Image (spheres, rainbow, N blue to C red):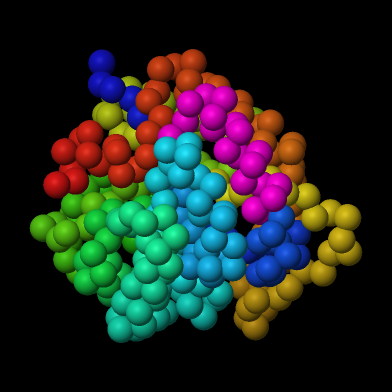
Amino acid sequence: MKKKYCLLSNDVETTSIWHNTLRDETGYKVLTEGMPLLLDLYAKYNVKSTFYFTGYIAKLYPEIVKMVIPYGHEVGSHGLSHTKENGFDVMPLEKQIRHLKTSKDILENIIGEEVISFRAPALRVNNDTAIALAETNFKIDSSVASQRFDMFMSFGGLKKLNWLTAPRLPYKTSKESLFKKGDGKIIEVPLSASLIPYLSTTMRIFPNFTALQRRVMAFESSKTGKPIVFDTHPNEFIDESDEERQINKRSKNIVASFLQDTVRSKLKVKNLGPAGIKIYEREIAYFDKHNFEFCTIKDFCKQKGLLE
């Protein structure tokens, strides 16, 4: 039987799900409420995980990065900014390089170690991103969600159609594209999906469906060796519902705003806060019971001989 891996990963940013916008106040709640809950849960199951921090939140609250180190977690980059206009699918190559270098420098100055893993905010990348990552000495990317089919509910939907044809197992990318195998320098570790994404947002909204989905993912892993790659966000485990809610509209297109702002925002507030942590523990407990190894994305790549 093939060795089974569960790679739990976390995107750390200042996004307020309740208000559908970026807020420094939310970042502070992530630091003081969301992260402690998540770190305690991982410690309970001896999970080693990868945390992707935006350069913005790392610079705003450096201690949010430092707090994962004693637990043996990996620090990765989530870009410099999570704003819509700084998506890696719309930035030109030189700007991508600047953002990657700056975010890398911020994180490395905080932890005193090299940062080699990246995940794009909102998983938005273009054909320049593979080049920019190699240019800035990143070695691992996890921005591709192979065979995921909900891209029109998020920004950059058309470019995310490439998810449908991307390989399911980890692979060396081509020099020009993260979506294709090749002889480039970047290792792609795709996020898990089965048309519907396997991640904490779906988990909170449709917990019963996710429970079924995890079994399908576990079966696939036992047959092919594909790692479970789960994505969560500590801002999902904070509660801002005591504040009056005003949904921020980020798109001027009526249809896009309806799907990406109104509909998505109303769905995404289900089971926020401690309720979400309880549901997440059920997922972790399942993989723990079925003898999956929890490790960082970097350590997985080393164990599989992908990382030189």
Tell me, yes or no, whether the highlighted magenta stretch contains residue 45. Answer: yes
Looking at the rendering, the stretch of residues picked out in magenta corresponds to: 30-48
Q: Image point 43% across, 41% down: which residue?
A: 73
Note whether residue 17 is visible.
no
Report whether 90 appears left or right of 298. right
Q: Is residue 255 left or right of residue 115?
A: right
> Is residue 29 within the magenta segment?
no
Q: Is residue 31 left or right of residue 91?
A: right
Q: Which residue occupies the foreground of this view, 112 or 185?
A: 112
Q: Residue at x 47, y 31 (%)?
A: 47
Magenta stretch, main secondary structure, is helix
Q: Residue at x 44, y 60 (%)?
A: 110
| Number of callouts | 0
Quadrant including the N terminus: top left
Of 220 and 42, which appears nearest the observer? 42
The part of the image, by quadrant, that contains residue 6 is: top left
Closer to the camera, 67 or 14?
Answer: 67
Q: On the rendered structure, is 166 left or right of 77? A: left
* Outermost residue, left side: 183
- Residue 57: quarter of image: bottom right
